[in-house]
Image (spheres, rainbow, N blue to C red):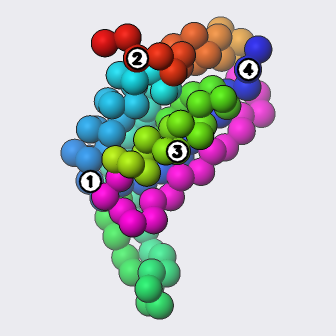
Amino acid sequence: MERAVFVYTTYPSVVEAEQAGRALVERRLCACVNILPGMVSFYWWQGKIDRGDEVVMIIKTRAGLAEPVRAAVKQMHSYATPAILALPIEAVDPDYHAWIVAEASGEETT
């Protein structure tokens, strides 16, 4: 069975994250997204350290859809250089894994 992955990204607001997350689920690019508000980030940007309030999104999908998820996130994102990281899952409950694989079909049904 195909390996499951988490795709990690961040957004500047809950509103933008919810819009992107819903679109990813509707397109069946993932089984689920988790949106976690309230993160503070410090990072280098254009030669200086910036601080930002951000929202974390964890996207649960199949390894084979990691690239289409990356492309969709980038296309919908307001950041010029969004963080998009595909993280392999080392261990997962078999029933949960089967659900991720079944729901992340990559074929929009709506």
Magenta segment: does it hold 90? yes
Q: Kindly indicate whether the residue at mark 3 contacts the one at mark 4 (C-beta within 8 angstroms).
A: no
Give me the disc on residue 108.
2
Mark positioned earlier in the residue sequence (4 or 1)? 4
Q: For mark 4, give the secondary structure.
A: loop
Distance from disc 3 to disc 2, alpha carbons, whole Å, reads: 17 Å
- First in sequence, mark 2 or 1: give its number: 1
Which quadrant of the figure contains the N terminus?
Answer: top right
Name of the residue lying farthest toward the bottom: 47
Quadrant where the image shows the C terminus? top left
**Residue 2: image tag:** 4
Give SS at disc 3: helix
Circle 4 crowding by C-alpha within 10 Å: few under 14, some 14–19, many from 20: few
Residue 50 in percent (x, y) is at 39, 81
Give the residue at mark 3: 70
In the image, 84: left or right of 97?
left
